[in-house]
Image (cartoon, rainbow, N blue to C red):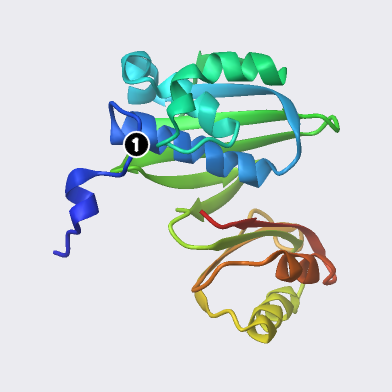
Amino acid sequence: MNISLFDVLGPVMIGPSSSHTAGAAKLARTARIIAERPFHRVRFGLYGSFAKTGLGHGTCKALLAGAMGLSGDDERLRDAENLAKQKGISYEFYEAELEDAHENTAVITFYCDDGSTVEVVGCSVGGGRIKITEIDGLAANIRAESPTLLITQNDRPGVVGAVSGALAESGLNIAIMRVSRETKGDIANCVIETDGEIGADLVEKIRRLPNIRSVRAINI
């Protein structure tokens, strides 16, 4: 078994818990990147340990701070409620009912300024690590440990090949690629982890490809 020093000590963070605080902040921050659009309201459904012990661990503050783009080591995390008030962002926490979910799971729903909503489900798996499991009802598997592309596309032949070609032309190597869909020929999610940072030019290039619905880059 290979165990790094970070597995033992945990991440640099504002305490008290790598799972309930640092992990929660990273989870919400990643969800905010996925949501992409400006928002004025956010709801957090807390499940399992997040719901039962989150208050004492500062989970609610960490989630709210992460949703506003703050990282787990940002000292402003403690003042997340006031920051939200200053930004005009309303928020709500409730206990979520989920099946077969990780104990540290949150359902994060963004109410965007353009009238749309984005729902991201994910969990904090320990040591400050996270996993995004669902985006707007579609299965996902995003850990945000390396630069990641999240592409929503029409499920058509040739789309994955065109995306792979765009990455090759940019000089980026694909480390992991996962494609998920609910129904053949409908909408699919493609998650690609790369060996290098994903630039805005590449994102725009992929966005212009046929049958691409949205492209988001996670460089955290």
Residue 23: percent from the left, percent from the top?
Answer: 39, 38
The vertical placement of 190 against 143, above or below, is below
Q: Which residue is mark 1?
A: 13
What is the number of callouts on the image?
1
Q: Is residue 51 above or below residue 159?
A: above
In the picture provided, is 60 more to the left or to the right than 203? left
Residue 212 visible to the viewer: yes
In percent of width and height, residue 203 lies at 73, 65
Give the residue at x 48% y 38%.
Answer: 71
| In the image, farthest residue toward the front | 75
In the rendered image, the quadrant that contains the N terminus is bottom left
Within 10 Å of disc 1 (Cα), the crowding (few <14, some 14-19, many 20+) is: some
Q: Position of residue 207 (x, y in %)?
A: 80, 64
Quadrant of residue 20 within the rendered picture: top left
Kindly tell me whether residue 101 is visible in this rendering.
no
Q: Residue furthest left?
A: 1
12 or 54, which is in the foreground?
12
Residue that appears at 25% across and 44% down: 10
Q: Residue at x 32, y 20 (%)?
A: 57
Quarter of the figure with residue 202: bottom right
Disc 1 element: loop
Which amino acid does the dot numbered 1 rest on? Met
From the viewer's perspective, is 99 left or right of 20?
Answer: right
Q: Who's the residue at 60% across and 19% down the image?
A: 83
Q: Is residue 139 above or below residue 179?
A: above
Residue 68: x %, y % from top left: 60, 31
